[in-house]
């Protein structure tokens, strides 16, 4: 699967159905070239256009439960 296709999928917590955001980047292991984690931008709140900082969460590959057609389900993140 291409990275651009993965970036278009919504990231959802499986336990509570909460929308986490969209993938903006990936963390890659230098030795193996495998993806370790995805960096996910959290959705902006109303009036957040006044703020310039963007909150980014790391979702480990081991936390991914299912990659579906439109969404990626992950374990509950802390």
Image (cartoon, grey):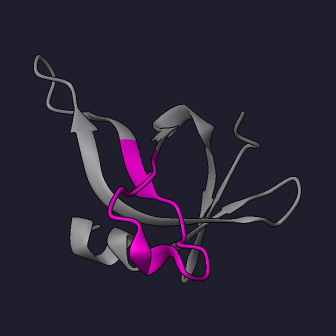
Q: Residue at x 32, y 63 (%)?
A: 52
Q: Is residue 71 visible?
A: yes
Q: Quadrant of the C terminus?
A: top right
Is 48 included in the stretch rendered in magenta?
yes
Q: Quadrant of the N terminus?
A: bottom left
Q: Residue at x 77, y 65 (%)?
A: 18
Residue 47, horizontal then vertical, whole percent? 55, 81
Residue most extreme to the front = 50
Q: Is residue 68 visible?
A: no
Q: Residue at x 36, y 69 (%)?
A: 6
Residue 38, horizontal then vertical, whole percent? 38, 47
Residue 16, horizontal then vertical, whole percent? 88, 59
Is residue 4 positioned above or below 78 on the image? below
Is residue 17 positioned above or below 65 on the image? below
Residue 51, horizontal then vertical, whole percent? 41, 66
Say left or right for 32 vs 78: left
Say left or right for 21 vs 75: left
Q: Which residues are magenta?
A: 38-56
Q: Residue at x 26, y 53 (%)?
A: 25
Q: Quadrant of residue 27?
A: top left
Is 33 included in the stretch rendered in magenta?
no
Say left or right for 60 vs 52: right
Residue most extreme to the top = 31
How many numbered circles does the render carry? 0
Q: Quadrant of residue 32?
A: top left
């Amino acid at each position: 699967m291409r990275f651009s296709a993965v970036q278009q999928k919504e990231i959802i917590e499986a336990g509570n159905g909460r929308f986490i955001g969209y993938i903006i980047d990936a963390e890659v292991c230098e030795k193996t070239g495998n993806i370790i984690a995805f960096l996910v931008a959290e959705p902006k709140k109303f009036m957040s256009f006044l703020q310039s900082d963007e909150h980014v969460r790391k979702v480990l590959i081991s936390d991914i439960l299912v990659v579906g057609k439109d969404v990626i389900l992950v374990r509950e993140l802390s």
